[in-house]
Image (tube, rainbow, N blue to C red):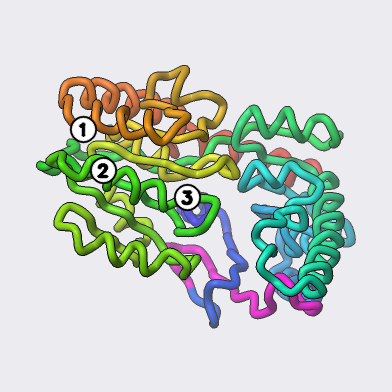
Amino acid sequence: MFLLATQLASSGWHVTYLTPDIKSAQVDQGVKLYPIRSSLVDATVEKEISTSLSEINPDIIYQRGRSTFTKACYHYCSKNNIPLVFALSMDIDCRVFRNSLRLKEYGSRNPVRWLWTALRLGAQDLSSYRAMKSADLICCQTNYQKRKIEKSSTAHLAVIRNMHPKHQSKVTKSNPPVILWLASIKKWKQPELFLELAKQLADRPYQFVLAGKMADEHYRQEIMDMTKQPNFSYIEDVDLEASNELIEKASVFVNSSIGNEGFPNTFIQSWLREVPTVSLLFDPDNLIADEQLGFVSGTVGQLCKDVDLLASDERVCQEIGSRARHYAEKTFSTDHVFPKVEALFEIMISGK
């Protein structure tokens, strides 16, 4: 979202970005950052967003990822005749019950509290789903998402790929080869499988790097124990610039998610830096397989074999990496995607 915001700002748009990630208003790269102080579960969040939007007086609103924010933005847009663009952030945005049926995440709670949480999230899911379907435009990350939404919505749909700037310099890989896992550390990302990969290939001359915010503290001790191994390291604080630096040095990028992804930005960042992707299960629109951008392993055993093949064979790794960069530049680069987004916004504003 911030990449899109900065690109709009550099193209002459006046962009305000409402976010709960800051405490006070500020300007970054031409984008006005405006704080949201209420949480997603706070009863006052809709009123706060409405007040903030009234002060901003926007011509168009772009909101990404289904939440209470979706309902708040829809109500403001409907009341003020402002076009609303909703952008899917994950495949589960397509489901009616996005959060309330993720039972495993609430399984350890007190039964009464679990039931209350499920009912509350269910009500939020229904309201955000209705708001999403009522948007003027729904931006899908993949054709798969578009097909899922088409079954239940008459809104205008468009597949808008995530975008990133082209990598301008020559890629230089580390020696020994670096095997990288980069994501927020949480249950459905299955970081434990990367730890298993590092154990299985411990006798190989590779460096294993696990990076990302510790969203689930359950994993910390196991990861810290792994860092005692000389070929394994953990990096917790990784911003966009740092992630690009890590990826550029890597020979293989590993994804072990169970399938709740939308379109990982790390895939695009990797392909632009000539890094093949080895994914356990997730392959958005079958691009990894169809475009030969790496491997979709299916099992942990095959994941180990695929990673070992790429890391041990520099020629194969470079061949796939070069193909990935070429494909990403013509499909996901800012030069390719942004003009389409800007044109859609202009059409929507002129027709409101």
Which residue is painted at 58% across and 60% down in the image?
A: 15
* Type of amino acid under label 2: Ile
Residue 77 as seen in the image, left or right of residue 286: right
Residue 33 belongs to magenta span:
yes
Residue 25 as seen in the image, left or right of residue 288: right
Which residue is painted at 49% across and 50% down in the image?
A: 189
Q: Are marks 1 and 2 in contact (CB under 8 Å)?
A: yes
| Residue 54 in view, yes or no | no
Residue 109 belongs to magenta span:
no
Q: CA distance from mark 1 to mark 3?
A: 22 Å
Graded by Cα atoms within 10 Å as few (under 14), some (14 to 19) or many (20 or more), the crowding at tag 3 reads some
Return the mark for residue 319: none
The mark that comes first in sequence, 3 or 2, is: 2
The total number of labels drawn is: 3
Q: Nearer the viewer, residue 321 or 11?
A: 321
Q: Is residue 239 above or below residue 290?
A: below
**Quarter location, residue 63:** bottom right
**Quarter location, residue 344:** top right
> Dot 1 lies on which element?
helix
* Type of amino acid under label 3: Gln
Stretch in magenta: 27-45
> Dot 2 lies on which element?
strand
Q: Residue furthest right?
A: 79
Q: CA distance from mark 3 to mark 2?
A: 16 Å
Question: Pointer 2: what residue?
Answer: 179
Question: Pointer 1: what residue?
Answer: 311
Question: Pointer 3: what residue?
Answer: 190
* Type of amino acid under label 1: Ala
